[in-house]
Image (cartoon, helix red, strand yellow):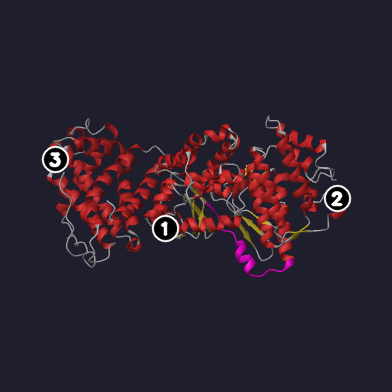
Amino acid sequence: MKKPEGAARRALRMAALTAGVTGSYVGYLAQRAFLGPEARQKKLKASHTRAAQRMTSEFLTLRGPAMKLGQTLSLQAGLLPEEMLSELATLQMSAPGMHASLARARFKAALGRDPDQVFKSFEPDPFAAASLGQVHRAVTREGARVAVKIQYPGIHDAVANDFRWFRTVSKGAQLTRHLPGVVLDELEAQILAETDYAREADNLEHFRKGLAPLPFVTVPKVYRRFGGQGVLTMEMLEGVHLDAWLAAKPSQKLRDTLGARLVDLYYFQLLDLQALHADPHWGNYLFGKDASIGLVDFGCVKYLDPKFVATLLSLYLYPGDRTSPHFQELLAERYALNGRTLSPASRKALARFAENFYRTVYPPELSKDDEPFDFSDDAFLKTYMRESANLGRSKVAIPEYVMIARAETGLYATLHRLKARVPMSKIVRKYLKSPR
Amino acid sequence: MPRAPAAPAARPRRRPAPPREAPLGRRARSKERTRERIVTAALALFQSKGFEETTTRAIARRARVAEGTVFNYFETKEDIALHFLELEVSHAIASVRNNRRLRRASLEEKLFALLQSQIDFLAPYEKFIGAAFVQALKPASKLGWSRQAAELRTRYLSFVQELIEESLPRGKPSALAWFGPPAFWIYYLGVLLYWLHDSSPGKQNTLAFIDRSLKLGVALLRKGVV
């Protein structure tokens, strides 16, 4: 790739040099927020492979990852200058893996004892990679099979450092509102929250209780006595990841059932529980042969303001013209919640999104409720991405939307992979307080 | 500072088994117990009162022995500290040698395990270690510059060298074999300082620092960059 010259490049080079040894995971995590699940799966695998590699990749790890934050945000907004984009694209990203001695040391620092003293058995090699660490199999003294998640040390400080640094180097983009400060705040809050395993344990318990009305969903039980700073132990769930589930060639009916359940799960969380498991990474879902769903990794959870949810309820399945003054008024109301007024360009972009994407996928007419939407054609995904980019260009910024968009993008990508046919409006209508 | 041991010409095929210690007689066992009591008492006082402020009389009182008995075992407080560091090095070497799983581990992991077991050993005496560090820098200090200190350092670095050589292809010259041990000594002192100043929960930043710096350092020396 030909490297562009200019102020942006020089600034980025300088910034890369100052990123320092603590340069960490912000880029990777931020990237996760916006990449499609498939791309993320690949990215995660690639990053862990690279982590085991030699010095060259380690060097890049040390200076590069925070740059990915900028790249990610620019891709999302579609707005940073082209030269900056291509420069950012040349930087590398990696999340280091932990050897068994480090994982043990981390466990001991958290619980005061070695894993072998705590569990009946503990596998020194991890069976899964988590973005902030890795997961080990273990069996408790009582014989329960558990998954022990161990976080790479020093993540919280490294993420906070990276954000401090990134705020400094992105001052320009913040001033021009190409990179809205509120989006950065929201992203930092969410990523820092992901480093807090005690909070994740709270999330797991909240969702385990909250999702109980959905019989097809399982959330693992937390073993608090085997947890601590950077260590989280939970029940081992049955089920396989999406790739393996699809490899068994499930019937169209089963794929439709799973698709409908995923949509049901999404809207139940958003509109009923008002809290969202906002990490749609496929590694966080375990599927059963009967289309049951196991949810793991509750690091990225968004608790929604009931007022915000109320505005969603008024917007969903809006029956009339979405360019009408009434609809636009509803949109403006949603923005007013954050003390902002909606610019005409943003209002137009939102109305266009509602008309071009949502009206097609979620037809508001009751008569169409039994007509499932076919997710096998990728045209809908292209429309979604196009309208998202258009929305980004209008500089619209709702902090809540960062995580909702992350979850929604993941949901659509999963439905597409399933080639599922799902009666979307029928499911959403269940959760609207006043049926239209 | 004494020089680190030079790299031997040929790499040993296998680590020699540690010599088996002869069982101690009753008298020797009693002496060993007294020595242990004195060291335990001294460490507790170094940690609670400080190294400078602790007197041999206070050590004797706490160990419930006569002050003269303390001198029968250790000439000075620094000798007690040195004895403790000898125990620390023996513990660390044994914990790496006796860990079967580590035999197939990478050099970075072995060195990590070595440092980690040292830090585990030192952790209850953190305040004393800080004081000992400063003490060792004084020109006349036995902790830094005595024959015993040099021997201890040599024993430690010989083991580091053994670990390095095990990880290298036989017969191939490497910067890692030549510069590894002396570089590791300076690095070890840096790790201790970092650990002493680390205020992160569970001192997790030290773990991250050791992990990342070992990966980078070993890679640099392997490549012959330094």
User: Whole-Å distance between the Cαs marked 1 and 3?
Assistant: 55 Å
Give the residue type at disc 1.
Answer: Ala
Above or below for A246 versus A270: below
Task: Specify the quadrant of the image occupied by residue A272.
Answer: top right
Residue found at the far right of this picture: A367
Asked if residue B154 lies left or right of residue A365, the reply is: left
Magenta residues span A233-252
Give the residue type at disc 2.
Answer: Glu
User: x and y percent of residue A53 in the render?
Assistant: 40, 58
User: x and y percent of residue A181 in the render?
Assistant: 58, 34
User: x and y percent of residue B71 in the render?
Assistant: 12, 39
User: x and y percent of residue B99 in the render?
Assistant: 33, 60
Would you say residue A103 sits in the magenta stretch? no
Give a yes or no on whether discs 1 and 2 share a subunit. yes
User: Whole-Å distance between the Cαs marked 2 and 3?
Assistant: 96 Å
Specify the label residue A184 is tagged with.
none
Q: Nearer the viewer, residue A217 or A301?
A: A301
Q: Nearer the viewer, residue A101 or A375?
A: A375
- State if disc 3 and disc 2 touch (CB < 8 Å): no
Specify the label residue B69 is tagged with.
3
Residue located at (46% from left, 59% from top): A49
Eye-nearest disc, 2 or 3: 2
Callout 3 secondary element: helix
Q: Residues within 10 Å of mark 2 (few under 14, many from 20)?
A: some
- For label 1, the residue is A52
**Marked residue chain, label 3:** B
Callout 1 secondary element: loop
- For label 2, the residue is A365
- State if disc 2 and disc 1 touch (CB < 8 Å): no
User: Whole-Å distance between the Cαs marked 1 and 2?
Assistant: 54 Å
Give a yes or no on whether discs 2 and 3 share a subunit. no
Q: Nearer the viewer, residue A102 or B127?
A: A102
